[in-house]
Amino acid sequence: MKPKLALYWASSCGGCEIAVVDIEEKILDVADFFDIVFWPCVMDFKYKDVEAMPDGDITICLFNGAIRTSENEYLAKLLRAKSKVLVAFGSCAQEGCIPGLANFYDKNSIFEFVYKNSPSVDEQSKGIYPVPITHMPEGEIEIPEFWNTVKTLDQVVEVDYYIPGCPPQSFQILNAVGAVIDILKNGKPLPPKGTVLGAGDKTCCDECPRERKEKKIKRFYRPQEIIPDPNECLLDQGIMCVGPATRSGCDALCVKANIGCRGCYGAPPNVTDQGAKMVAALSSVIDAQTPEEARKIMETLADPLGTFYRFSMASSILKRVQPKTRPDSSGK
Amino acid sequence: MITVNIDGKDIQVAEETTIVKAAESAGIWIPTMCYSELFEPYGICRLCSVEIIRGKRTRIVTACNYPLRENGLKIRTNSPVIQEIRKVLIELMLSRWPNVPVVKNMAASLGVIEPKFVSLERDEAEDACILCGMCVNICRDVVKANILGFANRGIKREVVLPYEKMNSECIVCGACAYVCPTGHIKIKSLDYERGAVADWYLGPKTAINIPTLQAVPRVPKIDEESCIKTQTGGCGICSTYCEPEAINYEDKDEEVEIEVGQILLATGFQLIDLKQMPQYGYGRLDNVYSSLEFEHMLNSTGPTGGLVKCKDGSEPRAVGIIHCIGSRDENYHKYCSRVCCMYALKFAHLVKDRTKAEVYQFYIDMRAFGKGYEEFYKRLLDEGVNMIRGKVAEIAEVHSGSDGKPYLLVKCEDTLIGKFREIALDMVILCPAIEPQFDAADVKKIFSISQSPDKFFLERHPKLDPISTMTDGVFIAGCAQGPKDIPDSVAQASAAAARMLSLISLGEVALDPVKAEVVDEYCSGCRICNNLCPYGAISFVDDKKISNINEMLCKGCGTCVAACPASAITGKGFTDMQILSEIEGLLSI
């Protein structure tokens, strides 16, 4: 009997699914080796099919997306129960990713903006908030409940392995899947629980071909303000790059395209809080003599919170912030 | 060796010796006018003509460039024929240059008083060019600059520069003026600057000199920028005169690497640039001196032999000494330079001692702390020095004096009488602030030490440890640490030396085990940590493209541990896991 593979898409953009398909003709080998039992994005499966499976029936489940709603959480728990190996696949499942940025706000303020204050809400439906159960003449309609906080997969269920990236690079998916096939075929032992698959142990800098010097940052530039030197370290040039605090594995994709690393491969091994680490590192290389000067330099950096915690807010030590109200639509 | 006979004397000389030298060794005088040992004999004046006798034949040759090669040659230096030749030669010269001392003296020694010729080109000047060619020869043979040469022929002959213009090939060595027997060639400074007293002690006076009288070791050194040998490859005269053969042109400045265990930084201080305060007129007005220049003037081996003199050579009628130029000044240095009050009082005392001048002290506060200083201040008050408590606003040159001599008008506030005053002086001495060396920041970096806000090197503790720095084995002493006088510098330096000796006698140094370390497997060489280490322990390993910590230098402060974005740097014994486990253990009790 073939090993069984499940893929699920919780709160995410779907890029991870595309990345899986991006392994091109190798997907046929995967389909050949595995019996794909659940992949709602690609084929028609029903939740009841999964519910009907005995526990531990699925050999391996690649779960992408953060836990935003009651449905996400239900599926996470369901797939955990049914799977021998549960993999947090992609940045959302691993560390919250872009959905995790919603943890700067709470459910009420998000609803208030999205269903009331947003300029794109029309007059008739202004202020109509979604509710889990609606009574209609034909019966009850149920939609998932929206949680106050976005959680990572491992904050909800036990996770065996992680494949980082937003999305994980196709060649890394291929490596990881190839390794899994190898293990299953040849009966090799599994890697220790909690292992990060499809990534390196160093940081993005290790793969970055740019030349780095002793760092001294006098100001930060936004991409439109500077034409970067293609050979010099972007951070040395004052272009924000989270590469030093980001796990290697993507083959320095963004920096090779003259864009600073955004940090999607998550914290390097041994680092608990990627954003805090980057702040500590940056504050060490700001070339200021006085606190005022340092503040001025830091003011040239746009959106610090979103820059340092773009992918790791939900998994950070802070996990979320407690704002009083959401800023109004004018952005003030 | 060959034997020749000069004027009846048998003399043994080496082959190729010239007759002049052979005669000199025998104590026989042959008159010369164009001859010098420094360059190839030229034989143009012909005064050294002598007779050489080979068998029955006699010949007249010039002694300066005739090399002796054969045994038994007879030479007559003073025969009637020779005397006649010399007389005619010197009479010809005397008729053309009747007033040049060397020609007149030579004529006199040859028994000629009046020339019997009348020259068409008679030159009455005392420093006329006598066309001896010595300048041309020294420039060609010794200096090897080849600037001077003869032009024209016969009585129109003259020494000229190429195209008769000043030439950049001339290195202004002055050798031509030095050998010129008449003083026709003179060295003139083109860059004469008003108040250029600074030149008294800046720059060497000769290419080979002893830098200062206090130099240790007190031996001459060659100034490469003005030495002819290093510039043109010529000259080398000093080496021919130095009997112990101590001169070595190959001895160049070199960088020597010495491994040491401890370093004492005593890099000293510099004085504030007085030209940035134009109100005091330093460098612009005559007779406005810095304290160091005045000290040089007071020195008995100085330019005036220790006499206090104005630039025009006269004795000043009134001298002002202004304290705190750049010290205790919000615009320059807030600190007190500590030594100025006392040397200013010394100046006042010496001026009083050596001249009849009135002396004015312009001070903010008199700081005469220290052994014997207050007593000296009291003594000065008794000597009748005028003390004005207040800051000088401006010094101006005024030409309205009754004798037409310009004087310096010092405008100041006298806070003790609450009045604004203008005081006429002939000389002003400024007491410039002591400040850190211009390159203190570079030195700081090299030795991984710190600078206090005033940019002097920072000591480990201002009271309890003013000798050592935050870097182990690096000590500081003297004005590099802060302004201080000689006794304090000596005390601090002695203490530092003692501290260093105590470590040497121990033989080994105990280091704290708390160190940071780079885990190579996790370091990606982002170089964030590279310039963080206050002890300079972190370096970048270029071939491995990762950073490395020198455990000998590391103090375990943890700055890099916190900064490392990859957590590739850990404190030994204080890793995150260790600390978290400790906390866990503590909480589980």
Image (cartoon, coloured by chain):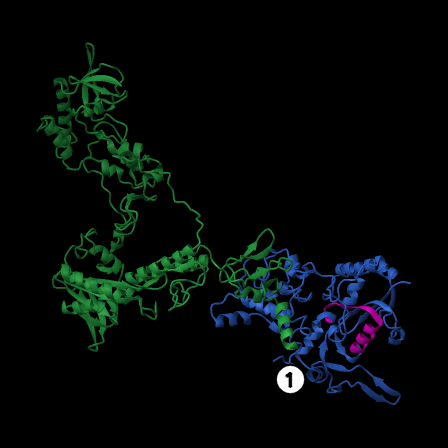
Image: A148 above or below B256: below
Quadrant of residue B18 within the rendered picture: top left
Quadrant of residue A305 within the rendered picture: bottom right
- Circle 1 residue: A325
Q: Nearer the viewer, residue B487 or B334?
A: B487
- Residue A38 visible, this angle: yes
For the point 66% across and 78% down, which residue is it? A320
Q: Nearer the viewer, residue A84 or A259?
A: A84
Residue A89 among magenta residues? yes
Identify which amino acid the numbered label 1 is placed on.
Answer: Thr
Location of residue B463 in the rendering, given as x and y in whole percent from the top left corner: 37, 69
Q: Quadrant of the N terminus of chain B?
A: top left
Mark 1 belongs to chain = A
- Residue B439 visible, this angle: no
What kind of element bears circle 1? loop
Location of residue B186 in the rendering, given as x and y in whole percent from the top left corner: 22, 41
Q: Main secondary structure of the magenta part?
A: helix
Q: How many marks?
A: 1
Q: Quadrant of the C terminus of chain B?
A: bottom right
Image: A181 above or below B136: below
Q: Is residue B336 left or right of residue A242?
A: left
Residue B253 among magenta residues? no
| Chain A painted colour | blue
Q: Nearer the viewer, residue B551 or B147?
A: B551
Magenta stretch?
Answer: A72-92
Q: Nearer the viewer, residue B586 or B87?
A: B586
Q: Is residue B390 left or right of residue B512?
A: left
Location of residue A154 in the rendering, given as x and y in whole percent from the top left corner: 74, 73
Image: B501 above or below B230: below
Image: A315 above or below B259: below
| Chain B painted colour | green
